[in-house]
Image (cartoon, rainbow, N blue to C red):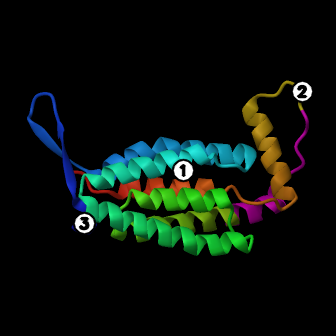
Amino acid sequence: MSSESIACATVPQRSRGYQIVSTTLMFLLVAAPLLAYAALRDVMTRLIPDGVSLAIAAAGFSLRLFEGWAAAATSVGLAAVVFCSLLLLAMRGLLGGGDVKLIAATTMGLPPPDVWTFIVATVLAGGILGVAYLIGRRVVSRPRRTPGASILRRVVALEAWRVRRRGPLPYAVAIAAGGMFLLFSIPRA
C-alpha cells in the first residue's frame, strides 16, 4: 500500500477516543454489498442496474473528498480514463456497458495506486471465471426442469443453459471479486 492509500479519517469510538480508519477501507465497506448485489443481478439477468454504479461512484467521490479536492479530482480523472479505455472494449463487444460503468464507478473511490491493484485482481478473477465457464461447457449436463423449484435451482439451471450455449460471462462477478480482494488485502491498523 502506498502512502496515498493510507489517508485517513477519524471515527469516534465508544471508550478509547478516536480510531484511525482508512478512507479506502470505508469506501470498500460501503461498496462491497453493492458490488455483491451487482454480481448477483448480473448472474441472474446479465444486467447491472445503473443505480448501483451511481451509488458506488457517489460514495467513492464523497469519501475521496475527505482527502481534499485534489484527491477527488484525481479520482474523477482516473475514473474517466478507465471508463474511456474500457468503452473501446465495450464498443468491440468484448465487455458489457454495465461492466464498464461498474469498474469506472469503483475506481472513483480508490486512490490511484489501488486502482491498478483492483484492475489486476478483476482481470485475474475474470480469467478464473472464464476458465470455469470453459470447463463448465464440457462438464455441465442438461438440467432437468423441475416445476416449483427454488430460485437458486432455477438460476443454476439457467446458468447451465447459458454455459452450454456459450453465452456471455457475468463479469460483475469478477469485478466484485476484485473489489473484495482489495478489501481483504488492506492492512488493518
Residue 14 is situated, as x and y percent measured from the top left of the image, at: 15, 28
In this rendering, the answer to whether 113 lies above or below 98 is below
- 51 on left or right of 161: left
| Amino acid type assigned to the residue bearing label 3 in the image | Glu
Label 1, label 2: how far apart the Cα atoms are: 35 Å
For marks 1 and 2, the one nearer the N-term is: 1
Residue that numbered label 3 is attached to: 4
Residue that numbered label 1 is attached to: 53
Callout 3 environment at 10 Å: few (<14), some (14 to 19), or many (20+)? Answer: some
Q: Is residue 111 magenta?
A: no
Q: Quadrant of residue 76?
A: bottom left
- 170 on left or right of 180: right
For marks 3 and 2, the one nearer the N-term is: 3
Residue 3 is situated, as x and y percent measured from the top left of the image, at: 21, 67
Label 3, label 2: how far apart the Cα atoms are: 54 Å
In this rendering, the answer to whether 60 lies above or below 131 is above
Q: Residue drawn 61% across and 48% down? A: 50
Q: Secondary structure at mark 3?
A: helix
Tag nearer the camera, 3 or 2 = 3
Residue 117 visible in the current orientation = no
Callout 2 environment at 10 Å: few (<14), some (14 to 19), or many (20+)? Answer: few
| Amino acid type assigned to the residue bearing label 1 in the image | Ser
Q: Secondary structure at mark 2?
A: loop
Bounds of the magenta span? 131-145
> Residue 147 got which mark?
2
